[in-house]
Amino acid sequence: MAARLTVVVPTLNEAERIVACLQPLRAWRKHGTELIVADGGSTDTTVVLAKPWADHVLVGPRGRAKQMNLGASMATGDVLLFLHADTQLPADAPAVLEAALTDAQVSWGRFDVQIDGESPLLKLVAALMNLRSRHSGIATGDQAMFVRRDVFQRVGGFPDQPLMEDIELSKRLRKLSRPACLRQRVITSGRRWEQHGVLRTIVLMWMLRALYWIGLPAERLARMYR
């Protein structure tokens, strides 16, 4: 019997994108996928727009880790997939996930990523992200991380920190098993890269990750990121 999937989408003022994110998952819901939107107190119409497309729309404290943990706490699926509101899953994702999870040793994983935007540098950024992740066993939220729900609960879910929560969860999960690094690509928006400058954002993100690895607190890094 195939594992039941719950997709958790954290949102904050995503009115422009939320329907485009959720609408393609309508067919998934018809085949048993549960869809949960975990909002962090949007001041736009995100919550109203999401309700027709989701099984549950939850509103809780702001903070991506808090929101994803809230969604996971309400989930009934055997597998959790965390999807950013500006990211689109590949059409064959359900079949790919089911195939990967037939292996009992696969407890978590992520997709390769493609960054949608004008700058040709974004292709290089995505390629480096996928390569680094495949060799390090560390995934990022842009890559649509998925994990068996019992394993997610065993490691304590996402750590309650304002940045690098995906890195920290990966480190915890990696102690249990290597991730399934699926080559099918999710497409994520390059808005944050292009808004602040692609090269500047590359340098900033690599610097923040390096500082995190040497032990700087996530709270301090979040202030630098903002």
Image: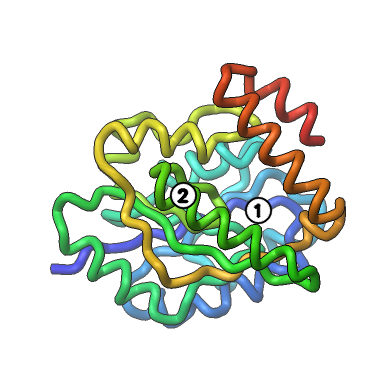
Q: Which residue is found at the position 34% from the left and 37% from the top? A: 173
Q: Under tag 2, what secondary structure?
A: helix
Q: At label 1, which amino acid type do we have?
A: Thr
Residue 11's tag is 1
Residue 218 to residue 13: above or below: above
Query: Residue 153, how many percent across, how many down?
Result: 32, 36
Q: Residue at horizontal 39%, vertical 73%?
A: 93
Q: Nearer the viewer, residue 116 or 68?
A: 116
The answer to whether residue 95 is above or below residue 181 is below
**Residue 133, label in figure:** 2
Residue 50 makes an appearance in the image: no
- Would residue 108 appear left or right of 66 to someone viewing this image? left
Which residue is found at the position 42% from the left and 56% from the top? 110
User: Could you tell me residue 180's position as x and y percent?
Assistant: 32, 55
Quadrant for residue 29, please give it. bottom left
Q: Is residue 184 above or below residue 142?
A: below
Q: Residue at x 14, y 53 (%)?
A: 104
For residue 23, which quarter of the picture?
bottom right
The residue carrying pointer 2 sits among few (fewer than 14), some (14 to 19) or many (20 or more) residues within 10 Å by Cα, namely some
Looking at the image, which is closer to me, 49 or 192? 192
**149 with respect to 185 (left or right):** left
Estimate how packed mark 1 is, as few (under 14), some (14 to 19) or many (20 or more) residues with alpha carbons within 10 Å: many
Determine whether 10 is above or below 28 in the image.
Answer: above
From the viewer's perspective, tell me whether residue 13 is left or right of residue 140.
right
Where's the N terminus, which quadrant?
A: bottom left
